[in-house]
Amino acid sequence: LNAPQLLVIGGVAAGMSAASRARRLDPELEITVLEKGPQVSYGACGLPYFVAGKIQASELIVHDAEFFREKRGLDVRTGMEAREIEMGRRRVRAVSVETGQEHLFHFDRLVIATGARVAWPAIPGLLQAPGTKPLPHVFPANTFADTTALDAYLRRSGARHAVVLGGGYIGLETADALHDRGLEVTVVQKTDRILRPFDDEITLRVEQALAARGIALRKGAAALAVTESEVISDAGRHPAQIVIVAAGLRPNVDLAEAAGVTLGPTGAIAVDDGMRTNIPSVFAAGDCAESTHLLTRRPVWIPLGTTANKQGRIAGENAAGPGGRARFAGVVGTMVTQLCGLECARTGLSEREAEDGSFRAVSVEIEQYTHAKYLGAGKLYVKLIGEPGSGRLLGAQMAGPSAGKRVDVIATALCARMTVEQLSQLDLSYHPAVAPVWEAVLVGAHELLKKM
Ligand SMILES: Cc1cc2nc3c(=O)[nH]c(=O)nc-3n(C[C@H](O)[C@H](O)[C@H](O)COP(=O)(O)OP(=O)(O)OC[C@H]3O[C@@H](n4cnc5c(N)ncnc54)[C@H](O)[C@@H]3O)c2cc1C
């Protein structure tokens, strides 16, 4: 009898986590991974450091396809693009990116891990012609292939000015990286807010950090056209021998949707907590799939590497054999970024999200040294959000040294459904070189308690 076949589409965080987990649980399973790009299993989150010239691209590759073939017994096919899932016939039609040759891959179980794609704004001049390739000086900065092409262009073109279209964290991290690389950078942001998941108190600090670094930010400026030497927006003309498209992401779901996989209200693939789609033995994980928000209990689409790895592992476990019971617990929207030396982190609901989500929200803001001043501590800004009456903790936003790890305390409290009072009583560590006696999280919780 032939071993069951598990097919995975997409070979980065979610896809390789799924394949590796399934292999660990079932050494007999035949596992094939189709990846249209040249690399599998790389750390996309480190791409800005490669763009900045601080690391080699190869340092981002966790393991190459060869490793997975030889050490894990996974049939990894790079440069192989899945074009159609023939659900009824339980097979995927794929095409070699290099030769154009068609291949058919049978599956008994399928994991869709196709990630997210860059939303391409309809601005004249970005593409060579409608529906075709970008102009040679226009790049997204989301994948290994995008950034190796960008790096090569930077080396040969001698470009001096760059415009980044979009003030989300990927756009801003790339802007920071290009600045490190010696370019004059302008970020053109259509709306009047950057970094949408953050409240204004944080974005203001980021704007100050960008300005201090010398990165120009044009908010509320819609890009109207792109030429070989500039971006024209309704705020003026911005010189640009390089244009980065970072104006948003969409779940990459066309393949799944065409095969009858149900999408959720966010536009990403609807999954249960075992990462199962509406079609038996078909799973989805990572940036192409939804998650449940633990505070609102609603489906959300928060495309992050942390979630992709965890969801991939769950999908792989459940796809490894019938009766898999692994569950993905859900998310609270925890994220951290580092921009122009400023660490910004958030978890739970921002004040705006809480109000939109019909919570009654109150907040407090504090600033606290991260450890003893005499040992060179910096100040951490903390905003804590809670719901008066219920005493419920709703979220936190932080900026400054150690924001990421301190926000993780709040994320843990949110996952454990703690009240603000319970948070204020946590037994947290103290040492002059590491944390103050009254840790920022505790001070914030005590202040918030007064309003609850
Ligand atoms: C610059 C940058 C910085 C980031 N920083 C962070 C961070 O600090 N923290 C964090 O948590 N997250 C971060 N992220 C997000 C994180 O990288 C993603 O959430 C994560 O990579 C998603 O993993 P995934 O496997 O779902 O999707 P992807 O990594 O997008 O992988 C999907 C793969 O599927 C392949 N694919 C798609 N369609 C097909 C097809 N038809 N056939 C074959 N292959 C296909 C694609 O080529 C792609 O390689 C960052 C992302 C970027 C771009």
Image (cartoon, rainbow, N blue to C red):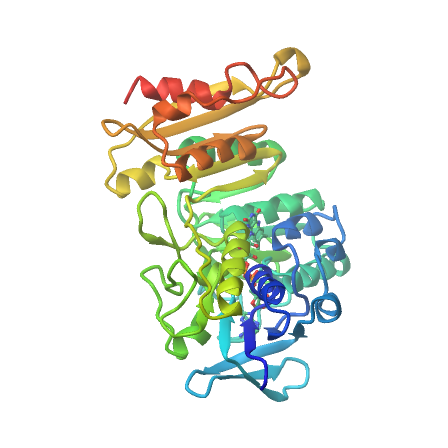
* Image vertical order of residue 172 relative to residue 427, above or below: below
123 vs 131, nearest the viewer = 131
Quadrant for the N terminus in the image: bottom right
- Number of on-image labels: 0
Q: Is residue 125 visible?
A: yes
* Image vertical order of residue 14 relative to residue 238, above or below: below
x and y percent of residue 267 in the render?
36, 63
Residue at 39 percent of width and 28 percent of height: 384
126 vs 3, nearest the viewer = 3
Q: Residue furthest front?
A: 1
x and y percent of residue 367 in the render?
48, 20
* 146 relative to 318 in the view: left or right: right
Q: Is residue 204 visible?
A: no
Residue at 43 percent of width and 62 percent of height: 275
211 vs 284, nearest the viewer = 284
x and y percent of residue 400 in the render?
55, 28
* Image vertical order of residue 245 relative to residue 408, above or below: below
The part of the image, by quadrant, that contains residue 96 is bottom right
Q: Residue furthest top?
A: 374
Q: Quadrant of ligand 1?
A: bottom right
* 81 relative to 386 in the view: left or right: right
* 60 relative to 243 in the view: left or right: right
* Image vertical order of residue 294 relative to residue 381, above or below: below
Quadrant for the C terminus in the image: top left
Residue at 27 percent of width and 38 percent of height: 355
75 vs 385, nearest the viewer = 75
x and y percent of residue 451 in the render?
29, 20
